[in-house]
Amino acid sequence: MISVLAPPSRAIGVPHERLDGKEKVSGRACYAADTPAERLAYGVFALANIPRGRIAQLDVGRAEHAAGVLRIFTHENMPRLNPVSSPPAGQSLLPLQSDRIAYEGQPIALAVAATLEQAAHAASLVRAEYEREPFNVDFRTQLERAVEGQSFFESDTRVGDVERELAQAPIRIAQRYRTADRHHCAMEPSATVARWENGSLTLDDATQYVWGVRMAVAQALDIAPERVRVRSSYAGGGFGSKGYVWPHQVLTAAAARELERPLKVVLTRAQAFTAHGYQTASEQALDIGAERDGTLRAVRATSINPTSRFDDYVEYCALSARSLYAAPAIETRHRVVHVDRSTPTPMRAPHDGVAMVGLEIAMDELAYEAGIDSLELRLRNYAQRDPTTGKPFSSKELRACYRLAAERFGWSGRNPRPGAMREGRVRIGWGMATALMGTFRMPASARVTVESDGRVLIEAGTQEIGTGVRTIMPQIAADVLGVPIEQVRIALGDTTLPETGGTFGSSTTMSVGSAVLDAATRLRDELRELGAHEDEDLGAVLSRSGRTSLSADGAWSPGEEGDFSMHTFGAVFAEVRVDEDLPIPRVSRVVGAYSAGRIINPTTARSQIQGGMVWGIGQALLEESSMDPTLGRYLSKNLAGYLVPANADVPELEVIFAEEVDAHASPLGAKGIGELGAVGVAPAIANAVFHATGVRVRELPIRLEMLLA
Amino acid sequence: MTLLETTLRVNGTSRRLEIDPRATLLDALRERLGLMGTKKGCDRGECGACTVHVNGRRVLSCMTLAAMHEGDEITTIEGLAREGTLHPVQQAFIEHDALQCGYCTSGQIMSAVACVREGHAGDEDEIREWMSGNLCRCGAYPNIVAAVAAAAQVMEQHAPI
Ligand code: FES
Ligand code: FES
């Protein structure tokens, strides 16, 4: 029985399997590159193989005459497009607009042909001669050139007298920590299918933000946004790489307009390494002063990261120090070095996920220096309020997380002496770290409709990239309307639907969920006005009042952050095993407990946190995009050289959620979890490696040679 | 480039095609036969997203040319369910939430079916090892292992599948 006034069905907070699971396991879920189209043409980019200079001569003759070729677009024949600011563009430089080359891998031509094989072959026939210019892709060799970058947070903050506190502190940890350039490597390469009809464009695009794509493409192509429809019904992961809008989307739309024919462009795996940003390496300096009992007196955190010559991208690797531990004096500072590379971009988990590496290894060093248990040190410096802004936290159950995860892990059984725990030839290390992640919220709208058969339809333009939104949103509406979740479905990923933000910043459940909650609540009120009573079928209510459907629009906007400091938290414990002679660290166990507001669907939430933990394992031990400084290019633009964790790299991962409702973050009480799981894992592993081996590694990823004594 | 006449037998149906000799089996399935369930993650044999069965064995369809498969029995994710009933591995993937974005899922499932048939699903460690050719950037690995282990039991009871 479908009823409107029945007690809540309690879908929220109950584990529920994915409503789109069947489509995904049967190969029916339609991703951008799967979009069917009549007379579809295929485009393949040819890329520059120098990092800086000018195209002196471009020879497209052979390419143009190859079989099946429809057009070779270059900077000479691609129409001039309007510049698009960043954001929504991921970078301000749009290729195929001039002869300038500003990074290796910049597109120099787009070969379009009737089949994929023909287009790929034609692209391989494009020949360029360059006037080369001196370049530098390595920021570490020019740290003295670091400058303040323009971006969305403050670069520098300061509370208390850091200089004096540091000078007077009996214990001092002053070290540098390094993280590596990394790539998102979503399994779905970016893809877009552009179709024009009567001056209007439909883009089926692999994106985390359909409205961002619409805005950028409309601006670049000088057409009204209403003439651009962007759809993304399923995206094969994004992790930030599909958050902003990148040149391939704009250029595909422009080329299809010229050709007057539908055009599909799917980036190759190699192209993905230079096509849509990367997570920058970081050079983090931590200077920590503490009392003998471990109480912090001062934290100074400084971070430098590379960015392109044409855009400032700041990876805020000193951000976490502003909020994590109580200290009377805290100073943070961010600088960037401009290099001859493409513009970096956020990647799961931006800022805090990188920042916590330095801070949490430094805290472990302090624990050993002070002779205090690592967990006890965190508890002694637990922040009741945000130590930089002085504001209370909107909610924080971190203390419970420490306790729950430590108990489950068995932390009290740890012998802290490095190398003390072993099994035969294998040294065992236990390490821990805190996780903290900033909360990002965005305005959203949604519509909820009851149809004549009593079924409920949610409409919201948000994207499904693997987070479970096709299940979570129905859970929310089901609870409000008192119907089983199976009666509810969602239409999403389309700019013709109510507008929402992008699927990034772990913001969807809070933002879109709150809009769905609002719409469903309004709908419930309207149904009550129609005289709906308990246990009454919604379809019957409609027919009684002579309607075929009833809709309500809802919206939510976060308003001012106001009086609260908003974060999610976690406590992560990791076990590593390191062979005595061949010291390849292997993660054998991870336990994490999280303070992340109300959990709407424990099944998908647990999966998402586990996925984040896998990212942490990659960050700690595997992932690094090395560049050849003499060629100015990545050494391995592939998944054989850029190592993402495989199944055998991943042990049992235990996830615990602390009971929590954050009424300040959203009316649902929920916060974001998409990124939190990827925070704290890498430093916990690095600290475990120290515990196992006695070697303090301050650079990720940890490689075998760093552990050879 | 002269086109080759080839007959591909996919999911029990034969289709006569004129095909570019450079076309991989993956691109032929997707772009010529419209079977979009098989995914391209790397096109270089590194990720496993394109896994299909050729004569019952798991094969990376991006690493083999379509024209080489005249007469072979090819099964893709679209051909796994029987009369609308999901294969036990497909069912187990849903029940164990062994997928997130779903992009690697077709390949994971095709690999998993073969992994069990090969007798490589004895315990969790063996599953981890023999499923390591299929990358999942969403990091669904623990649930994939659980799903394969559960499906292996069902498949044993209902052999042969
Ligand atoms: S697409 Fe075939 S292995 Fe990646
Ligand atoms: S489910 Fe997204 S890559 Fe595996």
Image (tube, rainbow, N blue to C red):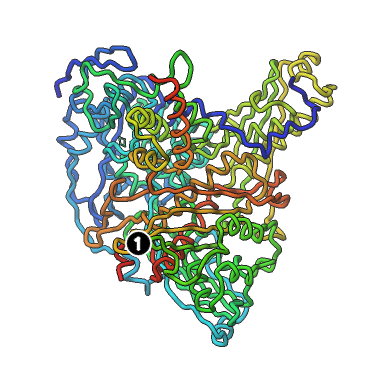
* Pick the front one: A390 or A472: A472
Q: Position of residue B27 (x, y in %)?
A: 29, 27
Question: Is B161 drawn above or below residue A577 in the view shown?
Answer: above
Q: Position of residue B131 (x, y in %)?
A: 36, 38
Q: Residue A519 vs residue B30: left or right?
A: right
Question: Is A4 drawn above or below residue A219 in the view shown?
Answer: above
Q: Residue at x 31, y 59 (%)?
A: A340
Question: Is A562 drawn above or below residue B87 in the view shown?
Answer: below
Q: Can residue A314 be seen by looking at this rendering? A: no
Which of the image's four quarters has the C terminus of chain A? bottom left
Which of the image's four quarters has the N terminus of chain A? top right
Q: Residue A291 vs residue A58: left or right?
A: right
* Pick the front one: A168 or A704: A704
Quadrant housing residue B83: top left
The residue carrying mark 1 is A425
Q: Residue at x 79, y 31 (%)?
A: A7
Question: Is A238 drawn above or below residue A226 in the view shown?
Answer: below
* Pick the front one: A509 or A546: A509
Q: Can residue A245 be seen by looking at this rendering? A: yes
Q: Position of residue A2 (x, y in %)?
A: 74, 21
* Pick the front one: A443 or B127: B127
**What chain does mark 1 sit on?**
A
Q: Position of residue A57 (x, y in %)?
A: 18, 47
Q: Residue A98 vs residue A453: left or right?
A: left
Q: Residue flagged by tag 1: what amino acid is it? A: Arg
State which image quarter holds ligand 2: top left
Question: Residue furthest toward the front?
Answer: A424
Helix, strand or loop under label 1: loop
